[in-house]
Amino acid sequence: MTASVTVRVPAKVNVQLAVGPLRPDGFHDLANVFLAVGLYDEVTVRPADELRVTCSGPDAAQVPLDRTNLAARAALALAARHGREANVHIHIDKDIPVAGGMAGGSADGAGALLACDALWGTGASREELLEICAELGSDVPFSLVGGAALGRGRGELLTPLETGGTFSWVFAVADGGLSTPAVYAECDRLRGTTPVPDPEPSAALLAALRTGDATALAAAVSNDLQPAAVSLRPSLAATLAAGEEAGALAAMVSGSGPTTAFLTAGEAEAEKVADALRSSGTCRAVRVTSGPVPGATVCGTARSSA
């Protein structure tokens, strides 16, 4: 009998986030190019008398521990489909910034889904898991898949992308979070009545990913939510400037922010940018990593001795 299952699931950065006009359902069509990067949450599930969520790690106090948590919702959704109770203790060992535009909550949802599938032996197909992920949220399917992918629709309709190498990144973590709905609302406000084209992926960006060319990728990255994030959190401008001055090839807000992302030419350059950001006083913490990396992966199981 399996006593626990642990799944490791990565953060993401959007190397392109093209946001289309507001849809009647309140969402926006996107051309969302995801890259999974090596900052991870670990989600462990084990049998329990009732559904329970706990969390440890940086910013754990900001993580909801009730049934609004995407990890809890993932367990409930899988249990409902397979006619069972979601009686599990879900523990999240959190290392992805909370409310930072790096899909930490989505990662936890994908991690809990894969872990519960393994714990319960439900044998869900990849298609079923991705379907549940899409029901949970726009970024959750990519957290399951990882690597690099183009997200269409709300971001949940994924096409895997070829990458020709590894890209070095520095992430500057800001104080506090930003609400994704608030950032999208600010994006709409800033656009006003200006016609918004349908979102399309950048051919130059996709080519740079394929060839592994960091300089070409830097020239093509874009985030339509960045003006809105900076409008709501003006201090981000100083963080972006500090990274650029330190030699980053590109500086951008990660997703809806407020984490900022800096693409560098390699590991040595990443450490230089990281040191400059740490001493700049413009951010709370700095992380150095690379991508792409795989999506949600079972990294440990324990068996009951009973």
Image (tube, rainbow, N blue to C red):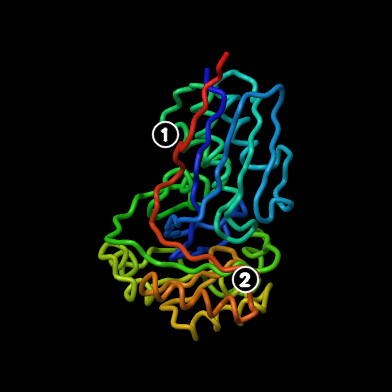
Quadrant for residue 42, please give it: top right
Question: Residues at badges 1 and 2 in contact (C-beta under 8 Å)?
Answer: no
Residue found farthest to the front: 305
- Label 1 and label 2: CA atoms lie apart by 34 Å
Between 55 and 181, the residue placed more toward the observer is 55
Residue beneath label 1, please? Answer: 127
Quadrant for residue 37, please give it: bottom left
Identified by mark 1, the residue type is Glu
Between 198 and 104, the residue placed more toward the observer is 104
How many residues crowd around disc 1 within 10 Å: few (fewer than 14), some, or many (20 or more)? few
Nearer the N terminus, badge 1 or badge 2?
1
Q: Position of residue 28 (x, y in %)?
A: 55, 58
Task: Examine the rendered structure and indicate whether residue 271 appears above or below residue 80.
Answer: below
Residue beneath label 2, please? Answer: 229
At a point 67% along the width and 47% down the height, the residue shown is 56
At a point 40% along the width and 59% down the height, the residue shown is 291
At a point 59% along the width and 66% down the height, the residue shown is 259
How many residues crowd around disc 2 within 10 Å: few (fewer than 14), some, or many (20 or more)? many
Residue found farthest to the bottom: 245
Between 49 and 276, the residue placed more toward the observer is 276
Q: Position of residue 57 (x, y in %)?
A: 65, 51
Residue found farthest to the top: 306
Q: Is residue 59 left or right of residue 80?
A: right
Identified by mark 2, the residue type is Ala
Task: Examine the rendered structure and indicate whether residue 44 appears above or below residue 82.
Answer: below
**Secondary structure beneath label 1:** helix
